[in-house]
Amino acid sequence: MTRPGSVKIREVGPRDGFQNEPEIIPTAEKIRLIDSLGRAGFTRIEVASFVRPDVIPQLADGVEVLKGIDVPDDVALMVLIPNSKGLDNALRVRELFHEASIFVSASETHNRKNINRTVAETMADDRVMAKRILEEGLTLNAVIATSFGCPYEGKIDLESVLTLAEQFADMGATEIGFGDTTGMANPAYVADFFSAALDRLRGVELTAHFHNTRGQGLANAYAALEVGCSSFESSFGELGGCPVPVGSTGNIATEDLVSMFEEMGVDTGLDLERVIESAREAQAFLGRKLTSHSILAGPVDWTGSLAGHP
């Protein structure tokens, strides 16, 4: 496969990033930051999760956020649905979002620790939810966590991941995301993984979701791109991670991903300077230095404006 000339990037910071903050971000601040991202050119943003408030209190205001944000009409808003009870709650405000995402972990142990269910139990509920989501006229997305490795079980069999993906496709999912949930992927395996996935799951949009836990996030995104992957997820400011287990920090920073792709001549459709500004706004509000490189360095300057300066 050849390198795609353009890619789609979904911003997941408002859900995946905010849920991992130790303190609850005020609703008004979430709305302000999401509105800022909406002005950067994103056409896909993950905004909320309909998980129990006592489980993830950082996202308890999801409905208020959905009601308060003001983004362009062409921005598709996605919510994460953990189970049928969460779907019941989501459908009460169905008019506020466009896409619903269901999920499972490829690892039995991680799935149990994450949502207290077996993989089989989760997939059975996912199938029921998928039918309801499609009947509502919503776009159905699916996510497979720990696709590239599990901190409890180690290597994850590629065949088992692709089998789960095929089941999601059979449910009607038009997009399937593969999550490197705790940052265990490496570029060589990513290339093999997406080569196999793209060949096997034709007609379905396959999305790469990498974490930068061990500093390989951008290298993994590059490896996926080179074998034909054209859909990615990332989080502004490198916010996020996985609450299970402790230490699994950081999605790829959206601004770093955009910078790399654009410098390679791959169109993202995004305004890099506005993405960076949104990340800087988040950094200022949180009061700590975020780990994105582009927050500090800014876009690459090819004008030679520093010529003559020491």
Image (cartoon, rainbow, N blue to C red):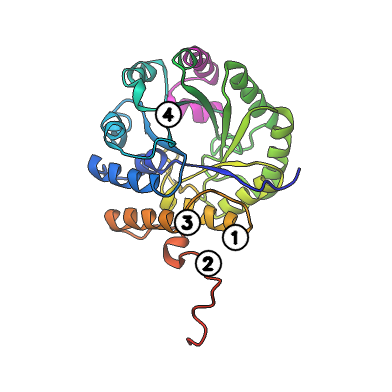
Q: Residue at x 50, y 31 (%)?
A: 110
Question: Viewer-nearest of labels 4 and 2?
Answer: 2
First-in-chain label (1 vs 2): 1
How packed mark 2 is, by other alpha carbons closer than 10 Å (few <14, some 14-19, many 20 or more), is few
First-in-chain label (2 vs 3): 3
Instruction: Report if the CB atoms under discs 1 and 3 are less than 8 Å apart.
Output: no
Compute the Cα span from label 2 to label 3. Answer: 10 Å
At label 1, the amino acid type is Glu
In the picture, residue 276 is in which quadrant? bottom left
Residue 97 rendering spot, x and y as whole percentages: 38, 27
Question: Which numbered marker is on residue 272?
Answer: 3
At label 2, the amino acid type is Val
Reading the image, the residue beneath label 1 is 263
Q: In the rendered view, would you say 138 is above or below 228?
A: above
At label 4, the amino acid type is Leu
Query: SS at mark 3?
Result: helix
Compute the Cα span from label 1 to label 3. Answer: 11 Å
Point out the stretch of residues depicted in magenta.
106-131
Question: Viewer-nearest of labels 4 and 3?
Answer: 3
Instruction: Report if the CB atoms under discs 1 and 2 are less than 8 Å apart.
Output: yes
Q: Main secondary structure of the magenta part?
A: helix
